[in-house]
Every structure is written in structure tokens, then in C-alpha cells.
Image (spheres, rainbow, N blue to C red):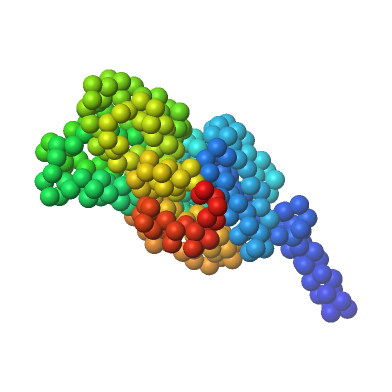
Amino acid sequence: MKKKLLSVLLAAGMMASLLVGCTAGGSGNKKVGVAMPTKDLQRWNQDGANMESQLKAAGYDVDLQYASNDINTQVTQIENMITSGCDVLVIASIDGDSLGTVLEQAKQKNIPVIAYDRLIMNSDAVTYYATFDNYMVGTKQGQYIEEQLGLKEGKGPYNMEIFTGDPGDNNARFFYGGAMDVLNPYIENGQIVVPSGQIDFDTVATANWASDAAQSRMEAIISSNYANGTQLDAVLCSNDSTAFGVTNALVANYTGAYPIITGQDCDIANVKNMLAGKQSMSIFKDTRTLASKTVEMVDAILKGTKAPVNDEETYNNGVKVVPSYLCEPVFADVNNYEELLIKSGYYKAEDLQ
Ligand code: BGC
């Protein structure tokens, strides 16, 4: 009798745990919500695709959403992920400061949140942060300009202009900070001159990282400062979408010797520009590596083990220091792109033709 009762209870328990596990549309798998900012930029398409395929390979169901760079759309998508039973959220925010309220709901339901690539600010609901070393990205861009212009050897003065990213993206401040920590001493001692006078973060920020906005600003800078034949020697661009806009403006409106232009992401259009001599370098951030680290974090959270982190001090989001994993960004130019981008299988040679 006792034995029978036990087996009934065991069966009921198994049913209950199966039902609890059935959050993902009946498959029995755990479900991960992946919120990406926009399909407009190549990298986020790759990030989303890599996350989806790697999560599926690890046995998870995936709800992948893109928000067309619209903050309200992203908030609604995250709300839906919470109400539809996602077990973990992975979020590349559009504006790091706009998710506090929706993430309160995640916290109340004990749904862990991984900030993906961009830190989510002012929320204690953020469990982990997976990204590339953003400060190092900026440092490498600054050092490239330093080396190419021979600034350490005392050369100059050279003319430089500066373009960084969206002020709502915490990364933009790290990219700008890393580069300017290298370049500021040369601005101060006069080896670098910024003829437009546009130097501080808010003035050189580019809303939504939009190429159009960078292009218009560069056009205005050319017509006010370089139309008289003044030589432009370098443009510090924090990423490829801003570099793309700057390149368009220069090709159409600037007649002097072509300047050094930095970038980040190794987007196909920008690698093509590098091969055509219209952009000098980019930073390669292998989105496959970031996805696999993030999947390891998801796995660890859901299995109750320790997630991989290698930085527990840099990323304070205003209310807590978020334990982070920083992947290493790599310098890319015409000399190493084949090794980095083609031999590694990131692109096919024909993608770059
Ligand atoms: C990312 C960059 C990207 C930029 C624009 C940043 O947060 O780290 O890789 O170029 O957003 O999307």
C-alpha cells in the first residue's frame, strides 16, 4: 500500500517537474530570450544568428527579437519574453538607461539577465555582462593613430577630427575614453590639432551610431575647416558605421591627401573600404566568441554552476559592479585581414569582392 502511494507521488512529482520545465511552447526545453537592437548594422545580424544557433545546439529554445533601434519596441519585446516564460534574458540594449522598469519585472520573476555587448545601466536586475574589452578597443584605435603619425617620436602638428557613438550606449564612453587617454597628451602639447574644435564626448557623439549623421557632421567640418586646402591627417572613428559616413563625406568633398581613418567591427563594407585604401584599420570582434561565452553563462545559470567571468571591477552600472567576461578585441588591417577574417571562416573571400 505504502509502496503504491510512493509510486503515485513519484509519478505526480515527475509530471509536475515536466510541467515546470515546459515553459517553452511545450518542447520541454528551457527558453532564452535574446533581444538585439537593430538589423541595420551587420554585426547585430551576426550576433543574433550566432546566439540562436549556439543556444539551439546547446538544447535551448530561443526567442530572438530585433527592435529597429526603437527603445519602446525593445521594452515591449522584453515584456513579452518575461510573460511568455523565458528562463533567461540576453539583452543588447539600445539605450542602457531605459530598461530599469521592465527588468524589475524580470527580477520579480527571478529571471536572470545577461547584458550582451552593451552594459545595462542603473538596474540591479543585471546578473552578468558579456562583452569585448571596450576600453581596449579605444586604446588600440588611439595607438594606431599614435604609431602611424609618429607621435611618440615627436612628429606633428597634425590635424585630426573625432567621431564616437551613441551617448545612450555605455560602450561609446569606453571607446572614446580608451582612445583619448592615448591621444589627449598630444592634443595638449600641440602635436595634434583639432581644427573644428569638436573634442568633448557630447559634441563628437553620433546618435544611434548612424552613418548618415556622421557623414553630415563630417561634411560640415570639411566645409568650415578644410575647404581652403588645410590637410586632414587622421579621423578617429569609434566604429565602422561612423567610419563609413566619414569616408563618404571625404570621398565626395575633400581633395587633400587621404587621412588615416579608424573603425571597429570589420563590417564587410568597411573591409572593402580598407582594401580600397579608404579606411585604414578596424577592430575585429569575433561575434562567434562572444556568443559562445554568453551561451556558457546561460548554461551555468540554468545548471546552477559558476559562470565564466574575468572582470569583477570595471563595469559599475550605477547600482552594482556587474561581473563580466571580456573577450579580447583584435587589430585588423589590409595585412592581416585574410588570416583573421577569411582563414578563420568568418567571411568567404567572395564576400569581400
Ligand atoms: C558595439 C559596436 C558597434 C556599435 C554600433 C557598440 O555597442 O560594441 O561593436 O559598432 O555598438 O552598433
The answer to which image quadrant residue 177 occupies is: top left
Residue lying at 39% horizontally and 35% vertically, measured from the top left: 247
Res 117 visible: yes
- Between 15 and 133, the one nearer to me in the picture: 133
Specify the quadrant that holds the N terminus.
bottom right
Ligand 1 image position (quadrant)? top left
Above or below, 265 against 326 in this view is above
Res 312 visible: no
- Between 31 and 267, the one nearer to me in the picture: 267
The answer to which image quadrant residue 15 occupies is: bottom right
- Give the percent coordinates (x, y) of residue 127: 49, 53
Count all numbered tags in the image, as a single digit: 0
Residue lying at 47% horizontally and 57% vertically, measured from the top left: 341
- Give the percent coordinates (x, y) of residue 46: 56, 50
- Give the percent coordinates (x, y) of residue 190: 12, 36
The answer to which image quadrant residue 18 occupies is: bottom right
Does residue 43 appear left or right of residue 183 in this picture?
right
Residue lying at 12% horizontally and 50% vertically, measured from the top left: 153
Residue lying at 42% horizontally and 56% vertically, measured from the top left: 337
Does residue 310 appear left or right of residue 226 in this picture?
right
- Give the percent coordinates (x, y) of residue 215: 40, 28
- Between 63 and 103, the one nearer to me in the picture: 63
